[in-house]
Image (cartoon, rainbow, N blue to C red):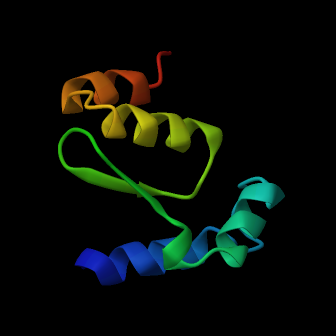
Amino acid sequence: MGAEGVFLGSRFIPTVENPAAQSVKQMIVDSSAADLLLYRTLPAYYRSLPTPFAEKLVAMDNQGASREEIAKVGVVQV
């Protein structure tokens, strides 16, 4: 579904049925496309709502970090 699928998925996150945190839901509702941060990583570019973590990845990208370096920071270690 491409961009339409992503848009539709974002519309489902703030629903009452979704167990996501209310603060996340409100951030989505209050945001527009102009608020999104863009950074490159593997396999391509990512867009994110502005959070401290996303801002860190954007800063790494702006400072010339490789896609691999950014991807390693973005991976959640379990």
Taking depth in this image into account, of 60 and 16 the one nearest to the observer is 60
The answer to whether residue 53 of the structure is visible from this angle is yes
Q: Is residue 63 left or right of residue 1?
A: right
Q: Is 69 located above or below residue 23 in the figure? A: above
Residue 14 against residue 20 in the figure, above or below: below
Q: Position of residue 31 (x, y in %)?
A: 64, 74
Please provide percent x and percent y for residue 29: 70, 76
Of residues 25 and 20, the one drawn nearer to the viewer in this rendering: 25
- Residue extending farthest to the top is 78
Which residue: 49% across, 77% down? 33
Q: Is residue 34 left or right of residue 63?
A: right
Judge from the rendering whether residue 67 lies leftward or rightward of residue 57; answer left or right.
Answer: left
Taking the spot 50% from the left edge, 15% from the top edge, the residue there is: 78
Position of residue 9 relative to residue 41, above or below, is below
Give the mark count: 0
Picture quadrant where residue 72 is located = top left
Name the one closer to the observer, 51 or 2: 51
Q: Quadrant of residue 35?
A: bottom right
- The quarter holding residue 38 reads bottom left
Is residue 75 visible in the rendered structure shown here?
no
Residue furthest right as drawn: 22
Quadrant in the picture for the N terminus = bottom left
Q: Residue at x 58, y 74 (%)?
A: 12
- The picture places residue 7, in percent across and down from the top left corner, at 43, 79
Q: Position of residue 48 (x, y in %)?
A: 48, 56
Q: Residue at x 45, y 81 (%)?
A: 8
